[in-house]
Amino acid sequence: MTAATAVIKRPPLTGSAILGLIFLGMTWGLFFSLSRFAGETEIEPLSILAYTLIAEVPLFGLICLYRGKYPRLFRPTSMAFYLMAGILGYMIPAILELYSAPIIGAGLLTIVVSLTPVVTVIIAFTMRTDQLNHRKIIGVILASLAMLPILLGEKLSVPIPELAGFGLALAVSVPLCYGFYHNFIAKFWPEGEDGWQLATGEMAIGCLTIVPMVFLFYGVELAPVMETGLYRIMIGYIVLSAASIYLYFFLLEKGGPIFVSLAGFVSLIAGVFFGMVFFGETHPWWVWLSVLVIVGAIWLATSGQTPNSDE
């Protein structure tokens, strides 16, 4: 292949990468339930995002101090990367999830966002950021088809039915952002920086851009955060964010954008489960049949990344 058409190649997947993918998917699934809890406090979603960013500053600062590595905020290329990555992978999806989760429910939101691998495959093919083979493509398509009965089901719990169309439109935009985000990171990863540096850079840019804007329009009201118990949800956000960020960049480096996007399918299983536990959401038997098919499809897609896989 010529330089213009070269595809980024990676080594075969390891057991630790597969386990990391499962844990990352479970973390993402729990995020959707937390988003619904946060949305039901009636505090502006943008304010929730701003408070969470501020609360993350000490955690990421301590991690940087311990590691002795900091984001390169004064290098123009890194600054542009942090800004784009923060918009695509953090700011826009977080806002969309916080607005849509109280409308359509945590379970349906999880299902819609689980379409991310399909979007990621299409973009990866266009940007040539990942190795494509038959097993990987068939696995993603099979998992997507297995989700159709769930998406078309009539027994999913929708908290605000009259706004379901609007909430669904917001939710559909989330996998589009994540699909671009996965491939953007893989394509333009700044040379000489590791995952924690990139994650801290994204968070720092978010604080510098989002927080002042939010406080300008909505002001600073800490009383509702304490009265509604939102601070408990924010603690969950912070802990899960730190764990998922480490796993995300680790898995992206090991397996590529398509592999890490498969955590979206895992999050479907986790999100449906958490929706049942926290909100009493119910699902018919064929939903669980679809879940089993998705599990098999994930195995098919991840087993396709071998040294002798057919490109």
Image (cartoon, helix red, strand yellow):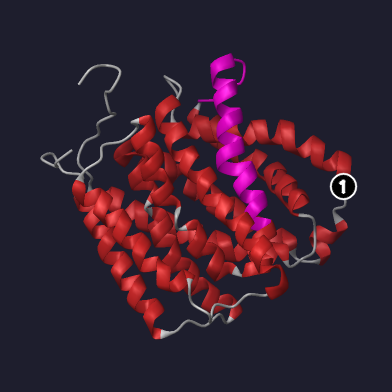
Left-right relation of 241 to 149: right
At a point 30% along the width and 41% down the height, the residue shown is 255
User: From this viewpoint, is residue 52 visible?
Assistant: yes
Q: Residues within 10 Å of mark 1 (few under 14, many from 20)?
A: few
At a point 68% along the width and 61% down the height, the residue shown is 166
Left-right relation of 224 to 275: right
Decide: is 276 above or below 225: below
Query: Which residue is more in the foreground, 73 or 188?
Result: 188
Q: Residue 159 falls in which quadrant of the image?
A: bottom right
Left-right relation of 20 to 136: right
Decide: is 205 above or below 94: above
Residue 13 location, x and y as percent? 23, 45
| Label 1 sits on residue | 218
At a point 48% along the width and 72% down the height, the residue shown is 152
Tally of numbered discs? 1
The quadrant in which the C terminus is found is top left
231 magenta-colored: no
Magenta span of residues: 69-98
Label the magenta part by its dominant secondary structure: helix
Amino acid type indicated by mark 1: Tyr
Residue 241 location, x and y as percent? 55, 49
Decide: is 299 above or below 156: above
73 magenta-colored: yes
